[in-house]
């Protein structure tokens, strides 16, 4: 079975698949946790509310390609 890919026009790198863009953004948000820990000398487990929001956002972004059910062309 042929699998279709949603392509996005992104600055600098040109076209990327939706899956690749979401994976890249997911990883950036996850890395943000480590950057915050290093920058402020703390563990994010000591800040559960901030950690939760970052992880919830990154997990949602990771799931977007699987949640996509249909692409419909519309005129703007």
Image: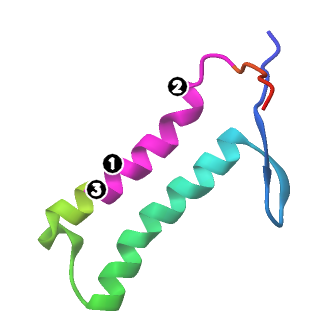
Q: Is residue 8 above or below residue 37?
A: above
Q: Quadrant of the N terminus?
A: top right
Is disc 3 placed on a helix, strand or loop? Answer: helix
| In contact (CB < 8 Å): disc 3 and disc 1 | yes
Towards the viewer: 8 or 2 = 8
Could you tell me what secondary structure mostly forms the magenta stretch?
A: helix
- Label 3 to label 2, Cα distance in Å? 20 Å
Is disc 2 placed on a helix, strand or loop? Answer: helix
* Residue beneath disc 3: 53
* Crowd rating for badge 2 (residues with CA inside 10 Å; few <14, some 14–19, many 20+): few
> Does residue 61 appear to the left or right of 48 in the view shown?
right
Residue occupying image coordinates x 43% and y 62%: 30
Residue occupying image coordinates x 59% and y 24%: 68
* Residue beneath disc 1: 56
> Picture coordinates of residue 70 (x, y %)?
66, 17
> Picture coordinates of residue 73 (x, y %)?
78, 22
Instruction: Name which quarter of the figure residue 55 lies in.
Output: bottom left
* Residue beneath disc 2: 67
- Span colored in magenta: 53-70
Mark positioned earlier in the residue sequence (3 or 2): 3
């Amino acid at each position: 079975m042929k699998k279709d890919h949603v392509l996005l026009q992104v600055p600098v790198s040109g076209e990327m698949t939706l899956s690749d863009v979401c994976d890249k953004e997911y990883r950036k948000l996850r890395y943000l946790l480590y950057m915050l820990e290093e920058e402020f000398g703390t563990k994010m487990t000591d800040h559960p509310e901030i950690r939760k929001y970052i992880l919830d956002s990154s997990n949602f972004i990771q799931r977007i390609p699987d949640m996509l059910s249909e692409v419909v062309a519309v005129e703007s």
